[in-house]
Image (cartoon, rainbow, N blue to C red):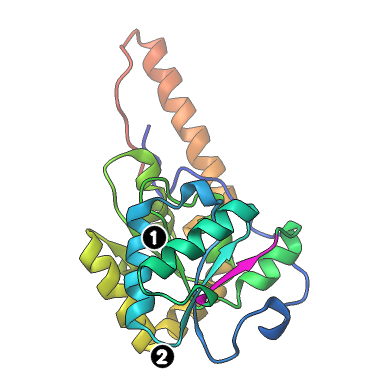
């Protein structure tokens, strides 16, 4: 059953603490902050290679990552160095409770989504915090989730169809801060209107889906793919 907006229900009104300054989060004040708060095992080699290409082309860029464990931190920094990227440009953030995490997320400029297994809740958290998520559309469910979330948030322009377009889009937004700022403001302003955060509407869609399935069953019809709009 394909729902009309997005499969994922989200909290439309999460608890958020006060936003810290960049210095408090260990971030340079004037940097272009690319972020990925997925756990380390979601960072596949191809995605990390693309991120390093982006950092190489954006001299003031840093990559803000979740500090999953010391081994992952050490290995990612070492891999960055082999690709010519100063390891200090990878900044690791410790785990925080959800309200504090959502508060700090808004310090990022652009979230970079991994390819094989996209961010799911991670992507939604970024979008709710006003941080657009750049993603590539893959061929299996886990690699297409962020594209669905972006679409439900009105950010189709942040969906890349291949690796090169992913890099090109990252560089475009890094060099067009006014465009990126406008998209950020649209996200924040749309918290009450975007389909991604309209949980009540999603509940109605689910009810309609169940009703359609049950009606089909009562008529003795076999299971079939269905789509709600």
- Residue at point 40%, 13% (across, down): 217
Quarter of the C terminus within the rendering: top left
- Dominant SS of magenta comes to strand
Q: Which type of secondary structure does the marked residue at label 1 adopt? A: helix
Instruction: Look at the image and give the residue range highlighted in magenta.
Output: 89-94
Q: Is residue 154 visible?
A: no
Residue labelled with disc 1: 48
* Image position of 224 with respect to 66: above or below: above
- Residue at point 50%, 46% (across, down): 41
Q: Nearer the viewer, mark 2 or mark 1?
A: 1
Task: Say whether disc 2 or disc 1 marks the residue closer to the N-terminus.
Answer: 1
Q: Foreground residue, 182 or 166? A: 166
**What x and y, as percent, mark residue 9?**
56, 46
Q: In the image, is residue 92 part of the stretch drawn in magenta?
A: yes
**What x and y, as percent, mark residue 49?**
34, 62
Q: Residue 140 got which mark?
A: none
């Amino acid at each position: 059953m394909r729902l009309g907006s997005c499969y994922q229900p989200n909290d439309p009104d999460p608890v958020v603490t006060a936003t810290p300054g960049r210095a408090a989060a260990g971030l340079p004040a004037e940097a272009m902050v690319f972020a990925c708060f997925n756990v380390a095992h979601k960072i596949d080699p191809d995605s990390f290679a693309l991120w390093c290409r982006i950092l190489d082309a954006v001299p003031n860029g840093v990559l803000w990552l979740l500090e999953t464990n010391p081994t992952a931190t050490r290995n990612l920094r070492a891999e960055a160095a082999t690709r010519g990227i100063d390891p200090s440009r990878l900044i690791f953030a410790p785990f925080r409770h959800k309200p504090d995490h959502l508060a700090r997320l808004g310090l990022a400029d652009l979230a970079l989504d991994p390819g094989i297994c996209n961010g799911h809740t991670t992507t939604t958290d970024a979008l709710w915090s006003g941080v657009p998520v750049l993603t590539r559309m893959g061929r299996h469910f886990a690699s297409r989730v962020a594209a669905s979330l972006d679409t439900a948030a009105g950010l189709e322009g942040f969906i890349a169809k291949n690796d090169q377009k992913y890099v090109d889009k990252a560089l475009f937004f890094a060099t067009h801060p006014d465009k990126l700022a406008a998209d950020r403001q649209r996200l924040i302003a749309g918290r009450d209107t975007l389909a991604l955060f309209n949980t009540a509407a999603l509940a109605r869609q689910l009810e309609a889906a169940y009703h359609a399935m049950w009606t089909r069953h009562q008529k003795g019809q076999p299971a079939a793919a269905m789509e709600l709009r």
